[in-house]
Amino acid sequence: MTQSDPQDLNLYFAELEQEARQAASALSTPEAVEEFRLVWLGRKQGKLKQLSDSLLKSAAPEARREIGQRFNALKSVVESLLEDAAGAGPSDSALAAEAIDITLPSTRGLLGAEHPITRTMNEIVQVFAALGYSVGVGPEVETDFYNFESMNFPPGHPARDTQDTLVIANQERRPLRDRLLLRTHTSPVQMRTMEQQPPPLRIVIPGKVHRNEADDATHSSTFHQVEGLCVDTNITFSDLKGTLDHAMKALFGSSVKTRFFPSFFPFTEPSADVQISCIFCGGKGCRRCKQSGWIELLGCGMVDPAVFAFAAEKQPGYDPKKISGFAFGMGVERIAMMKYGVSDIGQFFSGDMRFLEQFA
Ligand code: PHE
């Protein structure tokens, strides 16, 4: 080809354009489109680059204009071919290969659900929240001081034997009051809260507790409690009875009755155990209430002045001569077992999906 002959130039560029069009029409995959781009427009090895190097740069100045115009025309043809091919997306056959059947049922992920213990605990908390109680929490690994001493279980006192304790190992070098244990009840959070907040105080404390107990159908070494504490001027045993009677009706239905029996806890005086009329037989007597018509459900009492004395060391407002209060504590598993008809406490901790799915 002679560079200056327009005929030759026309033919040469027409052939190149034809070649590009043919190649572009065969592009069916994104990879092929990219390959096309490289072959034609690649910055180092592309055909157009080579063309410009061989033809354009070496052309005599008079011929440059002619060649340049044709070169630019070809370049924009190639660019628009590339644009069309890229925009067209994958070919029908490529699409068919990737197609999915949207009418097939999906593999469904399981939806999470609240654990029955969590649900029951929240329900109990809700009943007291509606009475104006706030919610408090404390650590599961507790000191001897908060779990026992400040709750009026002095070191060596036999009442400590009522809550067989799991202790953290290698604490012997610490003073007894600082030794760590797994809290046996939520009552230590009574003291932690009073140290932080002056009276009046109304608080519920849901949480996990641990005792060194052999597991059976009704006992688990790990279980949950909801604690309550109410402190103000002139709080009386009647307030305690009215509050718990209301709470039991809210939890088990308005026909439920309550009765209070003398009991003992180091941190309350007087102390009581609360029974509710049997929710299974309505009080007539059945297997579930051992024919008595009553079911024992929680412990409670008026806060012992010795407990207030410990709190008053940090918050002088807890002067037992000026204020009074009541406290209560209930086991969540026991209540959940009654509400949902669960006969083995171990089910709550088994992680067995067949059990848990029933609460979803
Ligand atoms: N902490 C007691 C227990 O675990 C329950 C309780 C709490 C009793 C508050 C009275 C007042 O057995």
Image (cartoon, rainbow, N blue to C red):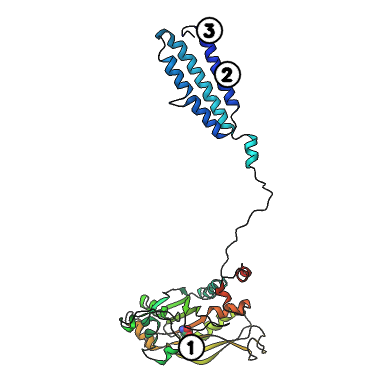
- On the question of residue 354 being in view, the answer is yes
Task: Work out how far the residue at label 2 is from the one at label 3, CA to CA, in angstroms.
Answer: 16 Å
Foreground tag (1 vs 3): 3
Q: Is residue 37 left or right of residue 153?
A: right
Q: Which residue is mark 2?
A: 18
| Residue drawn at the location 47% of the way across and 78% of the way down | 209
How many residues crowd around disc 1 within 10 Å: few (fewer than 14), some, or many (20 or more)?
A: some
Foreground tag (1 vs 2): 2
How many residues crowd around disc 3 within 10 Å: few (fewer than 14), some, or many (20 or more)?
A: few
Q: Secondary structure at mark 3?
A: helix
Q: Is residue 83 left or right of residue 229?
A: right
User: As displayed, is residue 46 above or below residue 263?
Assistant: above
The kind of residue tagged 3 is Gln
Looking at the picture, tell me which residue is in the foreground, 73 or 270.
73
Looking at the picture, tell me which residue is in the foreground, 120 or 208.
208
| Contact? badges 1 and 2 (CB < 8 Å) | no
- Give the quarter of the image for residue 161: bottom left
Please report whichever mark, 1 or 2, sits nearer to the chain's N-terminal start.
Answer: 2
Where's residue 68, x and y in %?
A: 45, 14
Task: Work out how far the residue at label 1 is from the one at label 2, CA to CA, in angstroms.
Answer: 102 Å
The kind of residue tagged 1 is Phe
Q: Secondary structure at mark 1?
A: helix
| Contact? badges 2 and 3 (CB < 8 Å) | no
Where's residue 296, x and y in %?
A: 57, 87
Q: Which residue is mark 3?
A: 7
Q: Which residue is mark 1?
A: 237
The kind of residue tagged 2 is Gln
Please report whichever mark, 1 or 3, sits nearer to the chain's N-terminal start.
Answer: 3
